[in-house]
Amino acid sequence: MKVTEHIKQAKGKTLFSFEIVPPQKGQNIQELYNNIDPLMEFKPPFIDVTTSREENVYLPKENGLLEKKITRMRPGTVGICASLKYKYDVDAIPHVLCGGFTKEETEYVLVDCHYLGLDNVMALRGDARKDEAYFQAANGGNTYAIDLVEQINNLNNGKYLHDIIETPYKSDFCVGVAGYPEKHLESPSLDTDLKRLKEKVDAGAHYVVTQMFFDNQKYFKFVEKARAIGITVPILPGIKPIAIQRHMQILPQVFRLDLPEPLIAEVEKCKNNKEIRQVGIEWAIQQSKELIAAGVPVVHYYSMGKSSNIEAIAKEVF
Ligand SMILES: NC(=O)C1=CN([C@@H]2O[C@H](COP(=O)(O)OP(=O)(O)OC[C@H]3O[C@@H](n4cnc5c(N)ncnc54)[C@H](O)[C@@H]3O)[C@@H](O)[C@H]2O)C=CC1
Ligand SMILES: Nc1nc(=O)c2c([nH]1)NC[C@@H]1CN(c3ccc(C(=O)N[C@@H](CCC(=O)O)C(=O)O)cc3)CN21
C-alpha cells in the first residue's frame, strides 16, 4: 500500500517507521533480520531500504602495489525489499538514486520494483562519492532528484525511455523525496532549497521525508515555510538518536546540522559511549513525544545498524 494511503488510514494517529542499510556483500542477511525483528512489534507500515553508492577498494597486485577498483559494497536493496515484503508483510521502500546509475539502469530497477509489487519508491539524488569533492551525475544518468521524479512519473504514465513503448499497463508508484529543515549543504539558502522541494513535489512527489534534526523547532518552522509556499503533501520527520561520541562531530560535518546546546551539555557529562547512547535515546524520546503531540503523520527513524536504541524509543512512544 502507498505511504499516503497508510497515512490516510491512520486517521491522525502517528505511525512508526524506520530505515535500514543493506549489509556489506558477503555478510549474513540474518543479522539484518535480527535487528528488524524487535521493531516489528511497533507495527511499522513501511520500512525504507537505502541504496549505497559505489566506493573505492584497493586490491593488492602481484608487484606489491595496490590497484584501485570501484565497487558497490552494499548491493541488494531491491532484493531486500522483496524479502521484507514477503517475510513481514510490510511495505518496503527502496531508495532509488541518481548518482552512479544511468537512466537505463534506473529504468531496470523501477521495472523490478513494479514486477515485485512495491508500491513506493524514495527518489534521491544521492551524495558525492567519497573520493569526489562534489556530486557528479553518471554519464547518461539523472542529475537532480527532480529528474528522477520525472522519470518515475513517466513510468506511472506508461512512458518508458526513448518513447519506444507506451503502454496502458502503468506503474503507480507513490514517490517520496528528501527535505532539509536546516537546508541541504549545497543550497545557498533555506528559501532556495524550499523552492527546489516545491519543484520536486510539483513534478509528482507524494510525500517528503526530512533530514535528521535534533531541535523540533527547526522542523516546525520548515513545515510552516513549506506550507506557505504551497507544499501540501505530508512531511515526515526523520529522527536519528545519537549513539556514540563521534556522532557529535560527524553528524554536523556530514549533514551540516546544528546540535542544540542542552544536548551537547548532556553528552559532555557522559563517561562512555554506553551513557551517550542512553542520552541519545532520551533525547529522541522527548523529540518524538513532542512531534506526536503536534500531530505529525509518521516519525521515521534512521536506524543505521543496531536497532536496540530505536526499540527503546519506540517502547516509550508507540
Ligand atoms: N530520507 C533519506 O534517505 C534522505 C536522504 N538524503 C540524502 O541527501 C542527498 C541529496 O539528495 P536530494 O535531496 O534527493 O537531492 P536534490 O537533487 O533534491 O538536491 C540536491 C541539491 O541540489 C539542489 N538543486 C536541486 N535542483 C536544482 C536545480 N535544478 N538547480 C540547481 N540546484 C538544484 C538542491 O537545493 C540541493 O542543494 C542524497 O544523498 C540523499 O540520499 C537526505 C535526506 C533524507
Ligand atoms: N546526505 C545524506 N545522505 C544520506 O545517505 C542520508 C541522509 N543525508 N539523511 C538521511 C539518511 C540518514 N543516513 C545516515 C547515514 C549514516 C549515519 C551515521 O551515523 N553513520 C555513521 C557515522 C558516519 C561515518 O562514519 O561516516 C554511524 O556511526 O552510524 C546516519 C544517518 C543516510 N541518509
Image (cartoon, grey):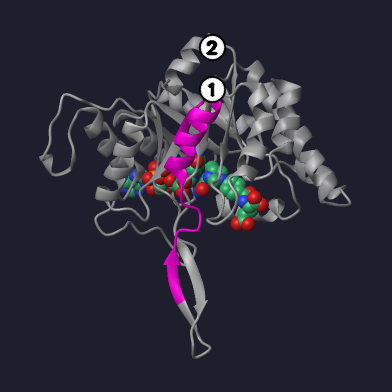
Between 74 and 121, which is closer to the camera in this rendering? Answer: 74
Vertical side of 302 occupied by 17: above or below: above
Q: Please state the horizontal and vertical placement of residue 75, each as a whole percent of the image.
A: 46, 52
Determine the CA span between mark 1 and mark 2.
10 Å
Residue drawn 45% across the image and 35% down it: 82
- SS under mark 1: loop
Can you name the residue that lies furthest to the bottom here?
A: 63
Magenta segment: 68-93
Answer left or right for 132 relative to 32.
Answer: left
Q: Can you tell which quarter of the image residue 119 is in?
A: top left
Residue drawn 55% across the image and 55% down it: 24
Q: Please state the horizontal and vertical placement of residue 154, each as a whole percent of the image.
A: 22, 33
Q: Please state the horizontal and vertical placement of residue 113, each as a whole percent of the image.
A: 35, 35
Q: Quadrant of ligand 1?
A: top left
Residue drawn 41% across the image and 20% down it: 232
Which residue is denoted by mark 2 in the rendering? 10
Can you name the residue that lies furthest to the top here?
A: 11
Would residue 267 be counted in the magenta stretch?
Answer: no
- SS under mark 2: helix
Q: Which amino acid, mark 1?
A: Pro
Between 58 and 61, which is closer to the camera in this rendering? Answer: 61
Q: Earlier in the sequence, mark 1 or mark 2?
A: 2
Q: Are marks 1 and 2 in contact (CB under 8 Å)?
A: yes
Q: Which amino acid, mark 2?
A: Ala
Q: Residues within 10 Å of mark 2 (few under 14, many from 20)?
A: few
Q: Which mark is residue 45?
A: 1
Q: Please state the horizontal and vertical placement of residue 207, each as a whole percent of the image.
A: 43, 27
* Residue 274 in sight here: yes
